[in-house]
Image (spheres, helix red, strand yellow):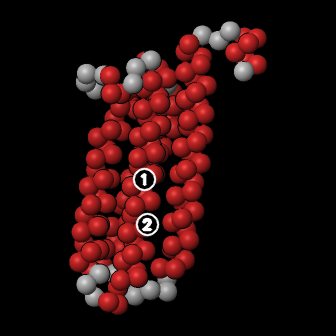
């Protein structure tokens, strides 16, 4: 509030400050997801091997890449880079849906139920990390253009 009262910032300055606050919140939430994954991974070591486990590294890589791209778009005020993330979100969602379907089939074997449940939790957290990257990208677009994504006609 002191900045508002003494510096009379322009609207673009306020959008930058608000976007930075939202970025910090999203990064904190991503950290929570990462901590949840770490707790589950410790438990996974004790469980029976399961086939769908091989899907997680690719999901993790995609979530990490999305986060890096979102943060870089924020730093660079790069709207095209931020907008490019929206198509990638659909891919991580599809990866999670495939993981879910395959893991549900594996859960038919009682020996895999707990491990499959853990894998679903990890997959869910990775998918949510991708969603958080999208939230950051939306903030970048608003910060730079003063338009919400929903108000834009196209992503050209």
The secondary element bearing badge 2 is classed as helix
CA distance for labels 2 and 1: 10 Å
Instruction: Please provide percent x and percent y for residue 140.
Output: 47, 28
Give neighbour class at mark 2: few <14, some 14-19, many 20+ (Cα, 10 Å).
many
Q: Which mark is residue 70?
A: none
Left or right: 60 with respect to 21?
left
Picture coordinates of residue 83 (x, y %)?
A: 35, 31
Residue in the image at 37% along x and 69% along y: 120
Q: Which residue is mark 1?
A: 128
Task: Please report the residue visible at 25 percent of the width from the left and 24 percent of the height from the top.
Answer: 154
The spot of residue 94 in percent (x, y) is 26, 55
Which quadrant of the view contains residue 133?
A: top left
Number of marks in the rendered image: 2
> On the picture, is 32 further left or further right than 81?
right
In this view, 41 is above or below 28? below
What residue lies at 42% left-to-right and 32% top-to-bottom? 138
Residue 40, compared with residue 35, is above or below; it is: below
Picture quadrant of residue 82? top left
- The secondary element bearing badge 1 is classed as helix
Tag shown at residue 122: 2
Image quadrant containing the C terminus: top left
Residue extending furthest toward the bottom: 111
For the N terminus, the image quarter is top right
Disc nearer the start of the sequence (2/1): 2
Residue plotted at (54% across, 59% down): 34
Q: Is residue 68 above or below residue 79?
A: below
Find residue 50 and report its horizontal and vertical position in percent: 34, 81
Work out whether residue 62 or residue 122 is closer to the camera in this orientation and state it: 122
């Amino acid at each position: 509030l002191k900045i508002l009262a003494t510096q009379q910032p322009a609207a673009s300055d306020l959008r930058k400050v608000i976007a930075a606050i939202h970025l910090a919140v999203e990064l904190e939430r991503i950290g929570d997801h990462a901590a949840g994954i770490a707790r589950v991974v410790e438990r996974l070591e004790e469980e029976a091997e399961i086939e769908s486990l091989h899907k997680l590294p690719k999901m993790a890589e995609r979530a990490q890449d999305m986060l890096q791209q979102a943060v870089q778009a924020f730093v660079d005020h790069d709207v095209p880079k931020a907008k490019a993330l929206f198509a990638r979100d659909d891919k991580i969602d599809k990866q999670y849906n495939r993981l879910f379907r395959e893991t549900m089939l594996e859960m038919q074997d009682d020996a895999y139920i707990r491990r499959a449940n853990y894998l679903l939790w990890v997959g869910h957290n990775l998918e949510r990390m991708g969603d958080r990257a999208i939230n950051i990208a939306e903030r970048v677009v608003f910060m730079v253009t003063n338009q919400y994504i929903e108000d834009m006609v196209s992503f050209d």
